[in-house]
Image: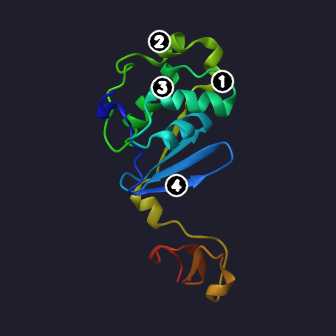
């Protein structure tokens, strides 16, 4: 199979938070957060530039102890590509098909495992104006991943001018 069909998950410019049944991927370039359900997350994690769609399908089938059609993997890769979560855009065999057509092709039995990628957008101005409600007097009052900035615990980013002095 040619290299254009060996997807590679994008890692640069992303903040990744893994949770029990999903993965939250925040794109620093676009200020968008993508919530990958378990199926989409499994496909994304398997996109290492070495695995074919067939390999990913077989790996998922073993982990889920269920049949995973290749078209289901193609659907996830198509969504990941559209959301710029792959190193390069991938032309999938389902490109141009509607989600309804793909569901029919994958089969109703696979409906539970359909890959879903939720999207949240954050305007840059809103990010700069966000402050934590918890007060602090010294750095020790904040959680380890936070800083004490103008008396307020914040994410470890530069102090926002919008936060109270």
Query: Which circle's residue, 1 or 2, is located before the other in the chain?
Result: 2
Residue wearing tag 1: 112
Whether the residues at callouts 3 and 2 have beta carbons within 8 Å, the answer is: no
Left or right, 69 with respect to 90, comes to right
Relative vertical location of residue 157 with respect to residue 123 in this rendering, above or below: below
* Residue closest to the far bottom: 138
Q: Position of residue 80 (x, y in %)?
A: 43, 36
Q: Nearer the viewer, residue 107 or 32?
A: 107
Which residue is located at x 62 percent, y 43 percent? 22
Left or right, 134 with respect to 44, comes to right
Can residue 10 be seen?
yes
Image depth: mark 3 or mark 2 in front: 3
Q: Position of residue 152 (x, y in %)?
A: 60, 78
Relative vertical location of residue 154 with respect to residue 115 in this rendering, above or below: below
Whether the residues at callouts 1 and 2 have beta carbons within 8 Å, the answer is: no
In the picture, the disc for residue 54 is 3
In the picture, the disc for residue 101 is 2
Query: Which circle's residue, 3 or 1, is located before the other in the chain?
Result: 3
Residue wearing tag 4: 16
Q: Nearer the viewer, residue 15 or 141?
A: 15
Query: Which circle's residue, 2 or 4, is located before the other in the chain?
Result: 4
Using the numbered discs, state the Cα–Cα distance from disc 3 to disc 2 in whole angstroms: 21 Å
Using the numbered discs, state the Cα–Cα distance from disc 4 to disc 3 in whole angstroms: 26 Å
The kind of secondary structure element at disc 1 is helix
Q: Please identify the quarter of the rendering in which residue 141 is found.
A: bottom right
The kind of secondary structure element at disc 3 is helix
Using the numbered discs, state the Cα–Cα distance from disc 3 to disc 1 in whole angstroms: 20 Å
């Amino acid at each position: 199979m040619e290299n254009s069909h060996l997807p590679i998950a994008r890692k640069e410019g992303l903040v990744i938070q893994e949770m029990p049944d999903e993965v939250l991927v925040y794109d620093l370039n676009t200020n968008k957060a993508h919530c990958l359900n378990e199926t989409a997350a499994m496909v994304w994690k398997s996109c290492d530039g070495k695995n074919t769609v067939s390999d990913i399908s077989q790996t998922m089938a073993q982990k889920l102890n269920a049949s995973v059609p290749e078209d289901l993997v193609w659907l996830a890769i198509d969504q990941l590509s559209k959301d710029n979560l792959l190193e390069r855009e991938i032309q999938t065999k389902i490109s141009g098909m509607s989600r309804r057509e793909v569901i029919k092709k994958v089969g109703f039995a696979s409906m539970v495992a359909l890959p879903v990628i939720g999207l949240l957008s954050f305007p840059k101005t809103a990010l700069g104006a966000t402050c934590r409600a918890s007060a602090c007097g010294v750095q020790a009052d904040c959680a380890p991943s936070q800083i004490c900035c103008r008396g307020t615990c914040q994410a470890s980013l530069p102090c926002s001018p919008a936060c109270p002095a």
